[in-house]
């Protein structure tokens, strides 16, 4: 589904990703771990098409297509979803309206009929159960005045509504208390399916107590330095990232 | 007296009106004379006037307007199509003339057309309080030459179950439309007044209107204005509220139409514990100049004013906000807040914000802020990353920016109407972004 080859990315003229290779197949959950500043967030952002990321080399192929040549919205319409580490406040824009606009754009691009307000609400209520979200969030402006945990739940809700093929989660566990973490992880687990790939970016192992990855990769200084099975995450937790560097 | 030839037509018009003026009671005639004198003295605002620094009225002052009542291309019943679908007591004006036969007047409230109001004691009390020497020359022009209008008298404790909705329709090229709407809200009365200005596109006319409200003790007034005049027209409106003890005003002004438009709002707190929440939104396209001026006079202690004025500007449009707050000596425990936020959608659009605070009391809470900027890129990215196209993302964000003003309208049907008008204009502005 996703194939990253020798990807080099600079931000503000500084090279952050220095040759990433990664292959993710449908149905798999991959965890990307690494210390701060290793390039984890940049990797998620370049996949979503953030304008600050300048690709200086390599390629990203998504379902056989050149992902890097696609616009931000076309990536989303093709099924790529990024759950933001720091979700953006959108003052004055109602959460329900936002979600319906997004879903209808995605549906339109897939040749499906748009949902009207009533049908959409039925879908939305169903999805909200997944993240145990209160109805009062629907009438509020997107992310405005939400606590950190509420914002992360809102990201997972968006993911559940848009039903992406490739979900990229950027430190969705950061800043969550244990209850919120359980809810968010539960939401992600319910999204697991043979047709969907999930890329989990995380600093800590604790998220992986709830979501069992198929593969774990360690990112350091802009490169994948180690890949392994889920046990690798436990090993990292125990020994710290410095251990990877040791010969 | 200002002896300029451009004012001669107004002198002539005043003469022509003398048969009508003679029918008015003495005190009214004296007021008119005084207003007319003041207008001729000051003349139209000039480019050099500090209060008109960004808003050039020379297009108006150079033009010849027709002061006499002008007929509309509509048989007056035809303007009913302008009625939005909401529950209200509709009052119609065509080219500045009140249309009593098609207007709805509910029981329990007196709505008196201006020519007949002269003998009404309530009207006399209200208008003499609102007529002061602080008026600018345009307000004087309205008081001097404006013959038509209505007086709405809401008695003590009354609360009409739906708003008064005034539709001002103008379609006569060269018309000078000068209606006056006066609202007297009695003790603890609750009332909502809407003014909706519409015009035939392409018609060059001049609306110079006056709206006055007196709020007795404990009264609550909501005032909404939607200005969608013809884009060839000039619109200058003054709204003045006199608030007594514990009264409450909510005022929302949407500036959408007009070539040059200014809305001036003055509030005077004449009793303790009164509050005014005042909001405005200007949506400018092309070469429109949309100007909001406020003056909040904290003349009594313990009053609260909260102002939010926003503009979204595309093309080569210009938005102006001038916000005066005066806290008089002795107006302790004043709480005054003012904010101006401006969103520029093009390189050539321009916004100016001028806060003017004069604080003469020491135990007060006053804050103001002004911001001018473009749409931030992070929210655009966020929306696009959810599949929303770039143009649509920018439209949604601009609408969200506007919503902060329209969301303050508690009447749902009216909030929706304001949203529709806002979206229409934003759709047009998108092309100029």
Image (spheres, grey):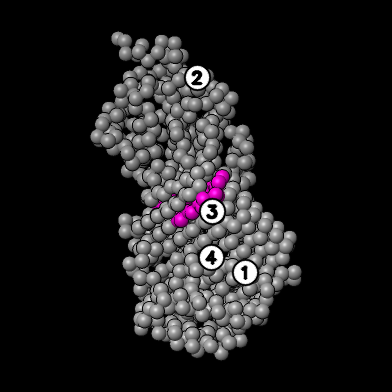
Q: Which residue is mark 3?
A: B298
Judged from the image, the secondary structure of the residue bearing numbered disc 3 is strand
**In-image side of A204 versus B408 (left or right):** left
Is any part of residue B328 visible from this angle? yes
**What residue is disc 2 on?**
A206
Chain for disc number 3: B
The chain containing the residue under callout 2 comes to: A
Residue B217 place in picture, x, y as percent: 67, 57
Residue at image mark 4: B239
Quarter occupied by residue B12: bottom left
Q: Which mark is residue B126?
A: 1
Stretch in magenta:
B323-343
- Which residue is nearer to you in this view: B185 or A40? B185
First of labels 1, 3 by sequence position: 1
What is the number of the mark on residue A204? none
Q: Chain of mark 4?
A: B
Q: Nearer the viewer, mark 2 or mark 1?
A: 1
Chain at numbered mark 1: B
2 vs 4, front mark: 4
- Could you tell me which secondary element the residue under label 4 belongs to? strand
Quote the CA–CA distance across marks 2 and 4.
Answer: 61 Å
Q: CA distance from mark 2 to mark 1?
A: 71 Å
Marks 2, 3 in one chain? no
How would you rate the neighbour count of disc 1 (Cα within 10 Å): few for under 14, some for 14-19, many for 20 or more?
A: many
Instruction: Identify the mark nearer the N-term, 4 or 1.
Output: 1
Q: Secondary structure at mark 2?
A: helix
Residue, x 59% and y 67% (percent of image)? B129
Tags 1 and 3 both on a single chain: yes
Q: Residue B157: x and y, percent?
A: 73, 60
């Amino acid at each position: 589904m996703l194939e990253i080859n020798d990807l080099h990315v600079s931000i503000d003229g500084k090279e952050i990703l220095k040759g990433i290779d990664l292959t993710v197949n449908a149905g798999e959950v991959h965890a990307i771990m690494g210390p701060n500043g290793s390039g984890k967030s940049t990797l998620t952002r370049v996949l979503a098409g953030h304008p600050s990321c300048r690709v200086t080399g390599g390629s990203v192929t998504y379902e056989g297509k050149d992902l890097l040549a696609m616009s931000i919205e076309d990536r989303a319409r093709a099924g790529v979803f990024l759950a933001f580490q720091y979700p953006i406040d959108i003052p004055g824009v109602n959460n329900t309206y936002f979600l319906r606009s997004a879903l209808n754009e995605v549906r339109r691009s897939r040749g499906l009929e748009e949902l009207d307000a009533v049908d959409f609400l039925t879908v939305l209520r169903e999805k909200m159960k997944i993240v145990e979200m209160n109805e009062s969030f629907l009438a509020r402006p997107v992310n405005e005045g939400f606590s950190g945990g509420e914002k992360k739940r809102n990201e997972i809700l968006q993911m559940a509504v848009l039903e992406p093929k490739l979900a990229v989660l950027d430190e969705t566990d950061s800043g969550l208390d244990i209850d919120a973490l359980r809810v968010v992880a539960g939401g992600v687990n319910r999204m697991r399916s043979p047709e969907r790939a999930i890329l989990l970016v995380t600093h800590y192992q604790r998220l992986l107590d709830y979501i069992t990855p198929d593969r774990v990769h360690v990112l350091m200084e802009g490169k994948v330095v180690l890949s392994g099975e889920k046990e690798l995450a436990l090993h990292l937790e125990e020994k710290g990232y410095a251990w990877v560097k040791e010969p | 007296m200002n002896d300029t030839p451009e004012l001669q037509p107004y002198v002539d018009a005043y003469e022509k009106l003398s048969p009508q003026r003679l029918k008015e009671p003495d005190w009214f005639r004296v007021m008119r004379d005084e207003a007319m004198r003041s207008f001729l003295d000051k003349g139209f605002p000039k480019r050099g006037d500090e209060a008109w620094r960004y808003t050039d009225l020379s297009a108006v002052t150079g033009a010849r307007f027709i002061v006499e009542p002008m007929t509309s291309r509509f048989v007056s019943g035809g303007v009913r199509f302008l009625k939005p679908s909401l529950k209200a007591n509709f009052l119609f004006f065509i080219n500045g003339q009140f249309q009593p036969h098609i207007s709805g007047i509910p029981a329990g409230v007196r709505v008196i057309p201006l020519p007949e109001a002269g003998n009404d004691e309530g009207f006399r009390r209200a208008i003499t309080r609102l007529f002061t020497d602080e008026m600018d020359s345009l307000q004087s022009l309205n008081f001097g030459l404006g013959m038509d209008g209505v007086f709405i008298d809401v008695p003590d404790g009354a609360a009409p179950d739906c708003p008064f909705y005034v539709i001002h329709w103008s379609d006569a090229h060269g018309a000078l439309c000068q209606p006056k709407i006066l609202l007297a809200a009695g003790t603890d009365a609750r009332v909502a007044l809407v003014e909706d200005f519409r015009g035939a596109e392409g018609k060059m006319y001049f609306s110079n209107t006056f709206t006055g409200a007196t709020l007795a003790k404990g009264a609550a007034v909501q005032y909404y204005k939607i200005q969608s005049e013809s884009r060839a027209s000039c619109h200058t409106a003054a709204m003045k509220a006199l608030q007594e003890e514990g009264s409450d005003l909510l005022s929302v002004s949407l500036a959408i139409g007009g070539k040059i438009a200014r809305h001036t709002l003055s509030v005077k707190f004449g009793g303790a514990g009164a509050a005014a929440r005042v909001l405005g939104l200007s949506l400018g396209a092309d070469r429109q100049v949309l100007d909001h001026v406020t003056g909040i006079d904290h003349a009594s202690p313990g009053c609260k004013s909260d102002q939010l004025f926003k503009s979204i500007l595309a093309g080569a449009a210009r938005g102006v906000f001038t916000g005066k707050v005066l806290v008089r000596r002795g107006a302790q425990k004043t709480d005054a807040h003012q904010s101006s936020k401006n969103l520029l959608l093009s390189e050539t659009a321009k916004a100016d914000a001028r806060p003017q605070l004069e604080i003469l009391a020491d135990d007060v809470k006053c804050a103001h802020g002004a911001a001018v900027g473009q749409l931030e890129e992070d929210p655009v990215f966020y929306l696009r990353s959810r599949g929303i196209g770039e143009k649509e993302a920018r439209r949604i964000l601009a609408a969200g920016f506007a919503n902060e003003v329209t969301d303050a309208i508690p009447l749902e049907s009216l909030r929706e109407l304001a949203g529709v008008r806002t979206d229409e204009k934003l759709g047009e502005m998108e092309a100029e972004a």
